[in-house]
Image (cartoon, grey):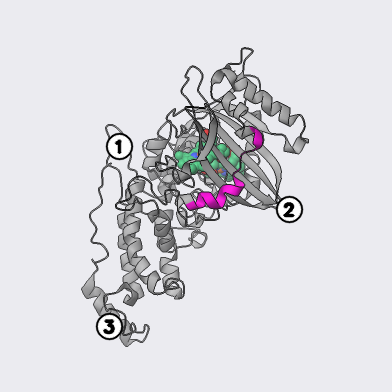
Amino acid sequence: MHNTHPGVHIAAKCTAPALGLSLVVLLAAGTITPASPNVRADSPLAWPLERWVGWRDEQINHILTSTLAPTGSDTRKMLARKEVSRASMHAYTVIQECLKADSSYFSKDAGRARELGNFVRFVKAQQWMVIPPGAAGKVPYGLGLEVPDEQYWNLAKPYLEFPELLKSQRFLTAMASPGTYRQALEMIDSINANLPPERKWISLLFDAQFITTVDDAHTYGRMLVMVPNEPVGNSEVADRWIQFGIADPGTYPETRSVSMFTVVRNAETPAKTTTYFSDFMRIRDKQTGKFSIRSNFTMLHDPSLNCYNCHKSSVLPIHPAREYVLDSGGKLAENRANAGELPAKLNNLIMGYGPPNYVYQDTFAYGPCLGPTNRYRSDAFLKSATAGLDISPTSYDRIRNAMHCSNCHNNFGVINYPQAVPTDLDLKAFRTHRGMVQTLVEQGTMPPGNTLTARERQALWRCLMSEYLNMDTKQGILADWLRGDSVSASPAVRN
Ligand code: HEC
Ligand code: HEC
């Protein structure tokens, strides 16, 4: 990967003469007090607000310049997440120096809180993913949580127990090869026979359209088992979404990945949920042939990284490339009878989970939602964002009216960095090298029920993205927010 950012001298570089002068003026006017005598004159603790703002803007510029060099014919401009994290860490070292001296440094002063609050949260959240120097192997904070991954696993473990059947030898053995998937499904049927309707497990076989498993099989084949409304503790219930990697038809690699998202809610406050997650491997002991399930987060070479990068809503909807059923011979065959029914039933649950609460993750720190409701989009903006697509001005209102994503998404899954920005995640993780937003918008899935033409849907995606972060000017909703603008307070009409 190519690193195009200019260097690491930013904290030291400041427009000294200009700032010096304004400092004198501010001091004379009595608007700020000089730093206490035990603070070094050049310490950031002594910076006046104006210097902080200048520094912040340089850092933002630096972070948003962390682009990937274009490869081959792919000339799209995109942010390289590693570079964003590195540039964030660079800024965070300065911030940390102040926080160490005074943990309320950025919150106790109204000006600093306003100008730097969002920026501090963003860089803090992104710097976790930097691999510390000398850390051979494991990234301690690869998940981007406030606690190291391994510690997270220990905290989350009680919520991520597999149901007895799903961790049993007979089930895991049946899941190990395509010829016995039928037996695995029959075991689930026999569990369901004794459960009341609201607790029956839902299983779905499909070919995923977005990403592969993280094991060596790198398969798109999936078997999702959703275990709903399971009582936990005294007054809580959990929905467990357990997703097994399975072999795609025709290929027989040993598939080991399995993942779980557990959404816990109190029976009395159903829209207030807490979510726990982990990726696991089903590991077969070479000698005994027996299976065990182990969390990736405890592994030295953990292939799983930041889940919130994609999981903006706690559980992501299932929009399969293809659904499968088992044919009379027990082989995976495309479901041509009632495809779409089970995914719709499952996806309908997602909005009801409310905003994700991952406990140890500051989801707010990843920025505001793509497609806010209260923004004016001028014809000139639409024209420039859709240049080359040959969009008639008669389409502008149709596109504008479809741009209100935050109307729903603020309630259950704010679409923010990196999903709302072109990044190397699109390139590296996704089957079509397009992110989830682009795919669901261009396929016509989002916003729900729209009647846009294929061309208008392409235009909609372009408008949303260039409004959020214009990769040429580095301006937009994300940049404004990093500079402390609250999106809800952004002017409804801009000239
Ligand atoms: C690059 C994007 C991406 C990342 C990163 C990601 N996921 Fe997912 N995940 C998806 C998509 C997309 C789906 C929806 C099903 C599908 O298409 O495969 C999904 C589905 C799931 C499901 C099934 C329940 C649901 O949400 O639909 C589980 C469980 C899951 N992921 C766990 C994880 C865990 C744990 C992590 C972090 C270690 C993680 N995922 C990271 C994209 C991602
Ligand atoms: C009427 C409410 C509504 C509006 C408006 C809406 N969405 Fe969604 N969106 C949903 C729901 C509900 C889901 C999850 C269930 C599903 O996919 O069927 C979802 C899922 C998604 C997902 C996958 C899950 C995630 O959180 O990343 C993306 C991406 C997405 N929407 C993008 C958009 C974009 C972009 C817009 C604006 C152009 C938009 N949506 C407008 C309701 C909405």
Q: Residues within 10 Å of mark 2 (few under 14, many from 20)?
A: few
Identify the residue under disc 1.
75
- Ligand 2 is found in the corner quadrant, namely top right
| Farthest-out residue, front | 287
Magenta stretch bounds: 151-165
Residue 144: x %, y % from top left: 44, 51
Identify the residue under disc 2.
235
**What distance separates the C-alpha of mark 2 from that of mark 3?**
61 Å
Residue 181 falls in image quadrant: top right
Tell whether 330 sits left or right of 209: right
Residue 327: x %, y % from top left: 62, 15
Residue 427: x %, y % from top left: 37, 36
**What distance separates the C-alpha of mark 1 from that of mark 2?**
54 Å
Q: Image point 24% across, 58% down: which residue?
A: 8
Identify the residue under disc 3.
24
Task: Name which of mark 1 and mark 2 comes first in the sequence.
Answer: 1
Task: Name which of mark 3 and mark 1 comes first in the sequence.
Answer: 3
Question: Does residue 161 belong to the magenta stretch?
Answer: yes
Element type at mark 1? loop
Residue 334: x %, y % from top left: 58, 19
Count of marks, rendered view: 3
Magenta stretch, main secondary structure class? helix
Q: Is residue 65 visible?
A: yes
- Which marked residue is nearer to the observer: mark 2 or mark 3? 2
Tell whether 321 sits left or right of 63: right
